[in-house]
Amino acid sequence: MMGNELEPVVYIGREGVSEAIISQADGVLETRELVKVRLLPDKGLTARAIAEILAGATGADIVQVVGNNFLLFRASVKKPRIELPAD
């Protein structure tokens, strides 16, 4: 899987999903399409819950949630790089 080799580029801490995090994730999704996000240890929401919030805010799809990491995908509007297999 492509996401196993990715390093996290968006980190979410105690402040949760702020406007700054949404903006950062949106920009990275446009550039890379597939983004790994790491939720720093916290006693708040789970990685799945944060993934759902961030995916909804950016129009991305959740690809995978493992531990405190998750992958989001959104095809680039300007320059698509990842081709998904046909159904």
Image: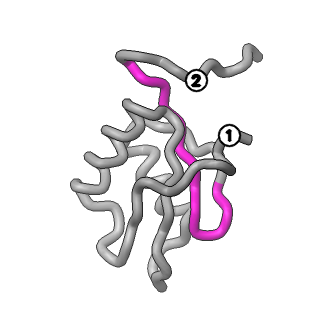
Label 1 Cα neighbours within 10 Å, binned few <14 / some 14-19 / many ≥20? few
Cβ–Cβ below 8 Å for labels 2 and 1? yes
Q: Magenta residues, as a range?
A: 65-77
Residue 19, given in percent of the width and then of the height, sits at 23, 54
Q: Mark 2 falls on what kind of element?
A: loop
How far is the residue under mark 2 from the one under mark 1?
A: 10 Å
If the image is split into quadrants, where does the C terminus sit?
A: top right
Q: Residue at x 48, y 73 (%)?
A: 45
Q: Residue furthest left?
A: 19
The answer to which quarter of the image holds residue 7 is bottom right
The amino acid on which the numbered mark 1 sits, given as a three-letter code, is Met
Q: Residue at x 46, y 45 (%)?
A: 55
Residue 5, given in percent of the width and then of the height, sits at 65, 49
Viewer-closest of 40 and 5: 5
Using residue 3 as the reference point, say whether residue 1 is left or right of it: right
Q: Earlier in the sequence, mark 2 or mark 1?
A: 1
Q: Residue at x 64, y 57 (%)?
A: 65
The amino acid on which the numbered mark 2 sits, given as a three-letter code, is Ile
The residue indicated by pointer 2 is: 82
If the image is split into quadrants, where does the N terminus sit?
A: top right
Q: Mark 1 falls on what kind of element?
A: helix
Q: In the image, which disc is placed on residue 2?
A: 1
Total labels: the figure holds: 2
Residue 70, given in percent of the width and then of the height, sits at 58, 56
Q: Is residue 72 magenta?
A: yes
Q: Residue at x 53, y 44 (%)?
A: 72
